[in-house]
Image: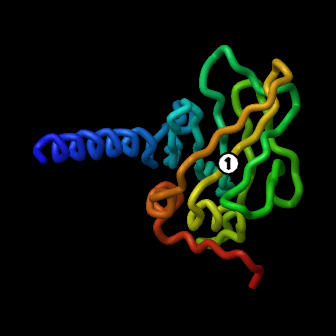
């Protein structure tokens, strides 16, 4: 009986450690030229890939996917495909604009803030979904995929983008 309790406690602690490694958090970055401070909602998954969502100085909301190490590179001019839960796949920014792609990252515009409102289905999905999946072509020609938990993303995104930000999915 005691052995079962110890085993259960050990497994529970291991589970909690794994969850702690993949938590959403807010970090700040200050532009040394302008002094503008950007609050970034970020998560790094167990595979070492990183996702960042932030509001830039022009009130544009950006989603950035980062490759995990210096040995891997995204294929040239190829935007990774992302999907929240079983919703529609996308490899484009809003308004069907292409993503910005570099060998180590890809970035998507997912909303433009007007006043304190943003019309953005992708942001709504990130705040209310369970998992975001990425599939991408590597520079080597191989495909790779990874995923990030969206558990707790809504509160963290509100903290990073603005507590008073209203996210809508339909034009009013």
Q: Name which residue lies at 78% across and 36% down.
A: 136
In the image, residue 17 sits, relative to residue 159, either above or below, namely: above
Q: Name which residue lies at 74% across and 64% down.
A: 87
Residue that numbered label 1 is attached to: 133
Q: Is residue 11 left or right of residue 141?
A: left
**In this orientation, which residue lies closer to the viewer: 137 or 120?**
137
Measuring from the top left, give residue 127's x and y in whole percent: 57, 64
Measuring from the top left, give residue 113's x and y in whole percent: 67, 65
**Residue projecting furthest to the left:** 2
Q: Name which residue lies at 50% across and 63% down.
A: 154
Measuring from the top left, give residue 73's x and y in whole percent: 74, 22
In the image, residue 151 sits, relative to residue 54, either above or below, namely: below
Quarter holding residue 3: top left
**Residue projecting furthest to the top:** 71
Q: Is residue 22 left or right of residue 9?
A: right
**In this orientation, which residue lies closer to the viewer: 143 or 169?**
143
Quarter holding residue 123: bottom right
**In this orientation, which residue lies closer to the viewer: 25 or 16?**
16
Task: Tell me how many marks there are.
Answer: 1
């Amino acid at each position: 009986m005691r052995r079962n309790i110890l085993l259960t406690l050990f497994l529970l602690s291991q589970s909690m450690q794994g969850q702690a490694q993949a938590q959403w958090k807010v970090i700040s970055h200050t532009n040394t030229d302008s002094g503008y401070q950007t609050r970034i909602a970020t998560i790094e998954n167990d595979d070492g890939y990183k996702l960042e969502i932030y509001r830039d100085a022009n009130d544009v909301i950006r989603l950035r996917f980062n490759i995990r190490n210096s040995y891997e590179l995204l294929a040239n001019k190829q935007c990774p495909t992302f999907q929240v839960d079983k919703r529609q796949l996308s490899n484009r920014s809003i308004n069907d604009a292409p993503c910005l792609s570099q060998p180590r990252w890809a970035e998507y515009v997912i909303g433009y803030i007007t006043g304190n409102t943003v019309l953005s289905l992708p942001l709504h999905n990130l705040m209310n979904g369970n998992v975001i999946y990425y599939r991408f072509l590597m520079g080597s020609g191989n495909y790779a995929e990874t995923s990030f938990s969206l558990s707790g993303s809504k509160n963290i995104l509100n903290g990073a983008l603005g507590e008073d930000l209203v996210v809508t999915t339909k034009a009013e």
